[in-house]
Image: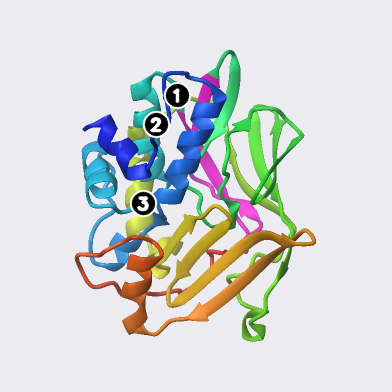
Amino acid sequence: MDIEAYFERIGYKHSRNKLDLETLTDILEHQIRAVPFENLNMHCGEAMELGLEAIFDHIVRRNRGGWCVQVNQLLHWALTKIGFQTTMLGGHVYISPANKYSTRIVHLLLQVTIDGRNYIVDAGFGSSMQIWQPLELISEKDQPQVPGIFRLTEERGIWYLDQIRREQYIPNEEFLNSALLQKKKHQKMYSFTLEPRAIEDFESMNTYLQTSPTSPFISTSLCSLQTPEGVHCLVGFTLAYRKFNYKDNTDLVEFKTLIEEEVEEVLKNIFNISLGRKLVPTNGDGFFTI
């Protein structure tokens, strides 16, 4: 695996000689704007592979994206390769309909230490809840970013990540009550501890999310990609774009329902993805919000 190929894939051309917060932030921002959060393989009859070599081939050589265990594992490799002190952590994702966190670890995130300060780095949450910059590991401190205000809170060794969101304006009236819209202004995202994890700790999760009837990823095909001003999301046949803070502390959210013939074109032109097999778009339970 070639680190130069990784940096070419994410379009990163800046210096990486300084292992500082500025460099870390720059790399994270480049990755989330080049590598989509997506599970399209599952809906093309292919597996979401866990091995680092396979992930590198999939994302770097084949110009694809992936879910958290893939994109964050690749980011962990790249950051470690250039010298950052990087640790894998495991998270429990908040399930809004059930009003609780997942019982099992289903999210891979990273901790990076720079000059004695710890930061949470995560390129694999997607949609409008994707962080754009590292979050300093400080409890109860508001950390404003373009997608919203993020807040980490620690209770008895467990950390919780929340997002405080803006109001949203939806010009497409038929989508005002869409299940894809996040209705809560204060949204819980996930919880985690600082116990170091290895990729082997995520093997059962990776299998579960692809095979269990209770996995929301089975019933929903999704793809999201950050832009300098917002985020594109494709969920089933629904294409959405959220422009952050377009006016008066309000996000603009525009929707379009695609026909089957448009999906391939949208994937190529907006997400820079070309699939080798036929995609069967689906949005079964509305767990994913934009």
Question: Which sits earlier in the primary sequence, circle 1 or circle 3?
Answer: 3
Q: Main secondary structure of the magenta part?
A: strand
Could you give the CA–CA distance between mark 1 and mark 3, rounded to whole angstroms?
20 Å
Q: Is residue 82 above or below residue 232?
A: above
Could you give the CA–CA distance between mark 1 and mark 2, rounded to whole angstroms?
6 Å
> Which residue is drawn at the image coordinates 56% and 76% (left, top)?
255
Could you give the CA–CA distance between mark 2 and mark 3, rounded to whole angstroms?
14 Å
Image quadrant where one finds the C terminus: bottom right
Residue type highlighted by circle 2: His
Residue type highlighted by circle 3: Gly
| Mark number, residue 86 | 1
Q: Which residue is mark 3?
A: 66
Image quadrant where one finds the N terminus: top left
Residue type highlighted by circle 1: Thr
Segment colored magenta: 88-113
Question: Picture coordinates of residue 182 (x, y %)?
Answer: 65, 64
* Of residues 214 and 106, the one drawn nearer to the viewer in this rendering: 106
SS for dot 3:
loop
Instruction: State yes or no: discs 1 and 2 in contact (Cβ < 8 Å).
Output: yes
Tell me if I can see residue 149 in this picture: yes
| Mark number, residue 53 | none
* Quadrant of res 180: bottom right
Crowding around mark 3 (Cα neighbors within 10 Å: few <14, some 14 to 19, many 20+) is many
